[in-house]
Each structure stands twice: as structure tokens, then as C-alpha cells.
Image: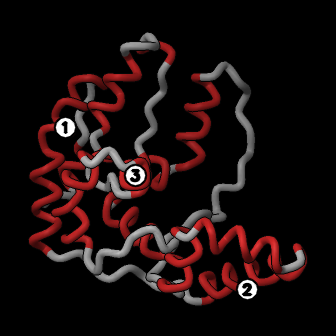
Amino acid sequence: DRAYSAYWYAVQKGREDLETFKEAIDLEPARLSSGDDYHIRYHAYLQRGLYAKQLGALLEIFPKEQVQVVILEEFKKNPKVVLNDIFNFMGLSSAIVNTGQRHNETSGESNKLLSMFMHKNKILRDVVKRILPGSVARKIKLLLSESRTRKKSSLPPMSICTRERLQEYYDSDVNQLETILGRKMDIWHSSRK
């Protein structure tokens, strides 16, 4: 679901112009191999989910004892326990943290054309910044942001075929991650059935 959510976040922010998630993951290898920094930064939907690969690279630099891995699903299920585990790992005292507020939620697209135009067109952004007084530009930015917030909606469901494709794509990486962590990732395997 991370890759799917990242696609819709890119659409919402005007950073993705492909109409479907399937198109985006079909074209991801070509986009990334182009060497274009924009694609590498915003269109690595599948690559960003290869956690064993990323963790392996991190463990080449830092010893395992200095790395704490947090599984999002476990954090969502019991945030206070996971946060206290993190505090303990860091040698800190437990603390009360408000875990009820959500941040950076992805919704369906808002004003796709305007977002894409503003994000991809640096010249236009620079002209707008020079022409409009700072207070007006801030108000416009706030209105666009509020528009996105008002239009919060759930993401369209992922097709069964695409979900199965993702499960197959990530299966080997999840198995490698289990080996690195020395624990089973039942929460990820069970979500695949």
C-alpha cells in the first residue's frame, strides 16, 4: 500500500502525470534508468519499498546494535508501546506523546492541472513570486492547501491484479528482511492473503 499511496500523493502534489498507478509502475524502470533526478526523487514507487536492500546498505555503515527498525503496522496498532521502545533504544525516559493526530495524509487529487503547472514550471513559479506581493502569494498557497484538505477522500481501491503484482514483486525482499531482522514479518505476509 505504501507504493500506491506514494503514487496518489505524487498525483495530488502535481508531480505525476500518468493516469494510473499501473502505468506508473510499468514505466518506473525506464524512468529511473533515465538518470533524471525528477524521476528518481518522485517516481520510485516500487524501489522505495525494497526495505531489505535499503537496510542492508545502512548496516554496511552502522552496526546492527545502533539501528532500530520500526514497522509501520505495529506502530499504528500500538503507537505508545512502539514509541517507548524507541525511547528505550535511544536511552531516553518514557514520555507521553499525542499519537492521535494524523499528518501528511494522502487523498485523491485536488487541482491536478494547477499543481502540476506550479511544481514543474520553475520559471512560472519565479515570475509569480516576483509579480505577486508576498502576502498575496501566501494567501493563494493557503487557499490551495485548504482546497486539498477540504477535498480529502479515500483513495480508489487498488485492483486485485495490481495488488498481486506488488506482492510478488516484494516477496523476495520481505524474506530477505526477515533474515536481516531475525524475525518473521507475519504482518506483511498475512496482508497478502
Amino acid type indicated by mark 2 = Leu
Establish if 102 lies above or below 184: below
Q: CA distance from mark 3 to mark 2?
A: 33 Å
Q: Earlier in the sequence, mark 3 or mark 1?
A: 3
Nearest the camera: 101 or 132? 132
> Taking 99 as reference, is 49 left or right?
left
Mark 3 lies on residue: 73
Number of residues whose C-alpha sits closer than 10 Å to that of mark 1, classed few (under 14), some (14–19) or many (20 or more): some
Nearest the camera: 171 or 76? 171
Mark 1 lies on residue: 173
> Taking 76 as reference, is 150 left or right?
right
Q: CA distance from mark 1 to mark 2?
A: 42 Å
**Which of the two discs, 3 and 1, sits closer to the camera?**
1
Amino acid type indicated by mark 1 = Asp
Q: Earlier in the sequence, mark 1 or mark 2?
A: 2
> Quick one: SS at disc 2?
helix
Nearest the camera: 23 or 108? 23
Question: What's the residue at 71%, 68% (across, down)?
Answer: 126
**Which of the two discs, 1 and 2, sits closer to the camera?**
2
Provide residue 120's location: percent of width, then percent of height: 51, 68
> Quick one: SS at disc 3?
helix
Could one spot residue 95 in this view of the protein? Answer: yes
Mark 2 lies on residue: 143
- Check the image and tell me how it is coloured: secondary structure
**Which of the two discs, 3 and 2, sits closer to the camera?**
2
Establish if 71 lies above or below 121: above
Amino acid type indicated by mark 3 = Glu
Question: What's the residue at 71%, 48% (across, down)?
Answer: 97
